[in-house]
Amino acid sequence: MKLLITGSSGFVGQNLLEYLEGFEIYSITRNQLNTPSLEQLNSCDTLIHLAGKAHDLKQTSNPQEYYQVNFELTKQLYDAFLHSDAKKFIFISSVKVAADTVEGILNEEVKPDPQTDYGKSKLMAEEYIQSQVLPEGKSYYILRPCMIHGPGNKGNLNLLYRLVAKGIPYPLAAFENKRSFLSIENLCFVIKELIERSDIFSGVYHVADDEAISTNELINVISGALEIKPRLWKINSGSIRLLAKIGDTLRLPLNSERLKKLTESYVVSNSKIKGALGKEFPVEARAGLRKTILSFKE
């Protein structure tokens, strides 16, 4: 079975290449994405589109870049796929297409309401894929992962790890929240299942670990990996909110927006993809987080 992968040099791509050992894999560069070759696509069974412009948390990117990379390049690639001999198109989107904030549990039935250029550009790509007539024998899978983590990933988990490792107490323990994470191994497992099977319907699928984890639980996992006692300060939440409002006025590091991001819940359902696969994910949520955290010690 031959695979064509875009974005293979990224975090997900590197892990996927290792996970799919035994497959015949070809990579396509960003420059080649501008003019995708039918010859390349005709030689593969499945096209896995990982390449994209990631969400810039510092908000320094030109908004137009998101639409050029996440929408226009995806559109060109999907058009080429439709005219090729390839059978499957797997597009890695994001749960940020569905919602930036979540009340309750986020599933695929929610009407997408992205608030950022990143989310909007990914949604445009999703809508384009779904709007095209799908030739007989072809399938598409739009995967919306939540926050992906794994060994070698240097995102927000690494930042929290460093704070805990330095013995800095977490002062927001009075806030109760739950967040969904996604082990890179579970994402790779889903992609491999989609590649190998022919009984999964085309569509949009949210991908998350089975269990959502609170920030307090996450700090306990980090502390356990470090073999130190967790330092959780349950300062009165009303006092913290008051301090954040003062921060709004005085432009302090802690303001209402930052407090919301630190303490909000974001729970994603994986029931649709698990129901389609009919299998359990290989990695339990806490075990996956612990594996990622232990890699920070190396």
Image: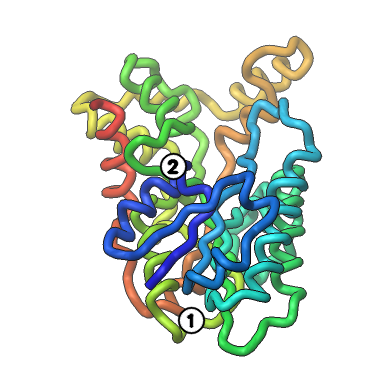
Label 1 element class? loop
Residue 55 at least partly seen? yes
Q: Which residue is mark 1?
A: 200
Figure quadrant of residue 84: bottom right
Figure quadrant of residue 238: top right
Q: How far is the residue under mark 1 from the one under mark 2?
A: 26 Å
Residue 178 at least partly seen? no
Figure quadrant of residue 128: bottom right
- Which of labels 1 and 2 is toward the front? 2
Residue 58 position in % (x across, y down)? 66, 26
Q: Residue at x 59, y 58 (%)?
A: 104
Label 2 element class? helix
Q: Residue at x 33, y 60 (%)?
A: 20
Q: Which residue is mark 2?
A: 11
| Relative depth, front residue between 55 and 35 | 35
Q: Is residue 67 left or right of residue 171?
A: right
Q: Is residue 148 left or right of residue 21?
A: right
- Determine whether label 1 and label 2 are within 8 Å by CB: no
Other-residue count near label 2 (Cα within 10 Å), few / some / many at <14 / 14–19 / ≥20: some
* Furthest residue in direction top, as rendered: 250
**22 lies above or below 56:** below
- Amino acid type shown at disc 1: Ile
**285 lies above or below 252:** below
Residue 264 position in % (x across, y down)? 58, 41
Q: In the image, which disc is placed on residue 125?
A: none
- Amino acid type shown at disc 2: Phe
Q: Residue at x 44, y 65 (%)?
A: 3
**195 lies above or below 27:** below
